[in-house]
Image (cartoon, rainbow, N blue to C red):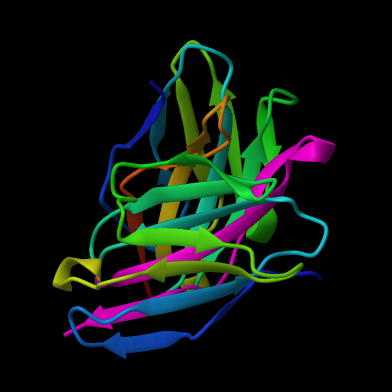
Amino acid sequence: AQSVTQLDSHVSVSEGTPVLLRCNYSSSYSPSLFWYVQHPNKGLQLLLKYTSAATLVKGINGFEAEFKKSETSFHLTKPSAHMSDAAEYFCVVSDRGTYKYIFGTGTRLKVLA
Amino acid sequence: EPEVTQTPSHQVTQMGQEVILRCVPISNHLYFYWYRQILGQKVEFLVSFYNNEISEKSEIFDDQFSVERPDGSNFTLKIRSTKLEDSAMYFCASSDIERGQETQYFGPGTRLLVL
């Protein structure tokens, strides 16, 4: 069975400093992985996706993620945090057979002024 | 840019009542999904729907739940007799898998409160 584990439930960074949100996956085959962001009282917005092309994936708003098969990781990074990045971030794996999404538990990012 | 829409944005109902949550997927998408997120918990898969039938459902999706595509645009989730524990945010999503696009696009959600 496929799964994703988000290693941190909460992350706090200062504005202008780098962001690292960690995600590890478990899959018996090459997975499709996604990061979504959820701002307060809003829906889920796609940040970026990995679907077996380039291992370094660039997304919206300056975010990127690197797929590392040897470490079964898909960590989300951003060089410089902005106040507007404060939100909940979900790492997601897509089930190969059914295409349903399996969500991680989420990481709440707080950005300090 | 096309987007998934959901109505209503909020719904308050009494326990035991029926509710219907509505979704309009992106127009050329043929795969549809419902997920829910209980407050403070992770997003959980409920059901997927393709070609006018359920493709897969989770163990949460019991006989109290049903989905329907009553016309060419709407996709609905019905809860026949709501329970307190059905209180959650319900998200609809659609995808364009025929064109190799696994990415799901989510609506803004319906927040359901069962009293």
Instruction: Check the image and report above or below for A10 versus A15.
Output: above
> From where the camera sits, is residue B66 visible?
yes
Query: Residue at the location (45% across, 18% down)?
Result: A27
Residue A97 falls in which quadrant of the image? Answer: top right
Is A21 colored magenta in this rendering? no
Residue B29 falls in which quadrant of the image? Answer: bottom right
Placement of the N terminus of chain A among the 4 image quadrants: top left
Q: In the image, is B95 to the left or to the right of A67?
A: right
- Residue B66 lies, in percent from the top left, at 43, 60
> From where the camera sits, is residue A19 visible?
no
Q: In the image, is B47 to the left or to the right of B68?
A: left
Who is closer to the viewer here, A110 or A15?
A110
Q: Please, what is the dominant secondary structure of the magenta stretch? A: strand
Q: Which residues are magenta?
A: B87-115
- Residue A28 lies, in percent from the top left, at 47, 12
- Residue A49 lies, in percent from the top left, at 64, 40
Q: In the image, is B24 to the left or to the right of B110?
A: right
Residue A65 falls in which quadrant of the image? Answer: top right
